Amino acid sequence: MNSITFLFYLLLFVFFQSALSAQATLEFSEIWQKIDQSSALQKSKYLEWKAAEISKDRAEGHWLPKLYTDLRSFQTNDPALNFFSKLGQRSAVDSDFSTASSRLRPSNFLDSNNQPYSTLNPNTLNLLAPDTLNNPGSNQYNRGVLGMDLPLYEGGSGQTLSKLQEKRASGLKWEWESTRERQFAEVAKLYRALQTWNEYSLKLEEFLKKEKKWQSSYQLSNKGNPVGYAGYLSLKSIQNKIQVLQKMVESQKDGIRQQLLSMSPELSLDFKTREVELSNFLDQNLPLPDNSNQLSLSTKAMQKFSEAESLRSQAEGAKVLPRIGLYTEANAYHGSRNMATSYNAGLYLQMNLYNPKDREVKEEAEMLAESFRKKLEDRIQKESAFFTSSLAREKQIKDSWKLLKENTETMDEQIQNTERLFSSGAVTAVQLAEALNRALDQAEALAGTEIEWLINRSELHAFIVERKEQ
């Protein structure tokens, strides 16, 4: 293989390695986009809101007339249905009124002189036959009805229910937004926490390499030398501590990846995060709320539900008020005799004078509405206290993080100085182990503070009314 071919394959290998590395590194916006598109929880809330929008649109048309139709084709031997169906055809005849009593009247057998007829009288024929009015036989009929009901006054129930559905739809929209923003904040917290644990893991690996190097060069591990053996034990305990912390960090990283994977199965477990400085990441993705008096999105949703409950009591009160409207119906009958049409139109008034199921329903609804308002009031008070304390905690965590970052750099420099002193014999192994132990505690405190800051900022994100999409 000549040098040109070798160089070509080397460049090709480097290109594919860089491509694979780029694929494995995902921006936070890419992670969020995948989760945002596949979140079952978000879809559930979104569909609930959209269903409420449909219900709201339907309630807004409460004043529109109701149109209905009733088409029937039936076979019956019922005397009433037969008689009225023939009337509906406008084709009733005398024989339809024939009964047994009409054939047995004395006038059918006696003339005007009260003498019996000497000839046959058609009214006396078929004396034993069933009468046609009570026994019409079985007949086939077709009936069609087209009607309209136009409400003029509904006691205010239509307008009230329309407003109620509007409030409910608005509340469900806030609830969906709240669910989406909470999940956004959770994903942001997990994504940046993964970088924190990665940085902490690298720090532990660095400390472990230092400890192994010092321990391999340490010659005083004999128990016969108490001072030297104490140094050996100190270094050994540091090694064990680092290994325990490494297992804890790996467990945290695995847990975060599993949580993200549960939100979107499209994610892979081996993706890498784009390194971003913590304060920059928070300011860009989880900014602090602008207004200290604003409510969280979930509380805004609860506020709309409370307003809807207040309207529900008004709707319940409308049940005892009268309903007035116009109605009209067009009828068509078809049978063996004829086909004919008819209509009826008029004004109606309906009112429940007494219904035990509606007894004190308004009072019950008012109590439930008041209960909801009290729950909302309690939540607003607690939320205000939480918001104030979280803002104060935000400043405390940020200040602590800055100090810990500064102390970590100082501890790194101190470890380097202690290493040189240990190599020259100026400090003992015990002193070296103590310095490394303090550096470990410092790194652990920094990682814990970063996680605490992420949690606090993600909780404050619930008070963000509008977030600029990345």
Image (spheres, rainbow, N blue to C red):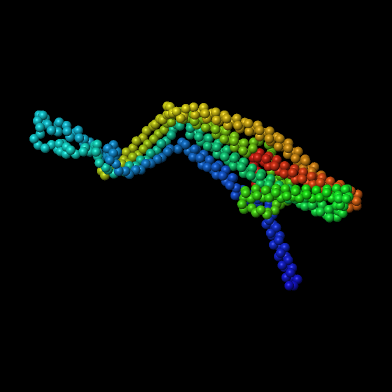
Q: Residue furthest bottom?
A: 2
Does any portion of residue 52 appear in the rendered image?
yes
Q: Residue at x 75, y 40 (%)?
A: 397
**Residue 405 in the image, given as x and y percentages of width and height:** 79, 45
Q: Residue at x 61, y 42 (%)?
A: 179
Foreground of the two, 334 or 397? 397
Among the 4 quarters of the image, the one containing residue 379: top right
> How many discs appear?
0
**Residue 389 in the image, given as x and y percentages of width and height:** 71, 35
Q: Residue at x 83, y 49 (%)?
A: 233
Among the 4 quarters of the image, the one containing residue 454: top right
Q: Residue at x 59, y 34 (%)?
A: 303
Quadrant of the image containing the N terminus: bottom right
Q: Is residue 217 above or below residue 346?
A: below
User: Left or right: 240 with respect to 256?
Assistant: right
**Residue 240 in the image, given as x and y percentages of width and height:** 78, 49
Foreground of the two, 17 or 416? 416
**Residue 328 in the image, given as x and y percentages of width and height:** 37, 36
Q: Residue furthest left?
A: 118
Does any portion of residue 210 appear in the rendered image?
no
User: Left or right: 307 with respect to 140?
Assistant: right
Q: Residue furthest front?
A: 224
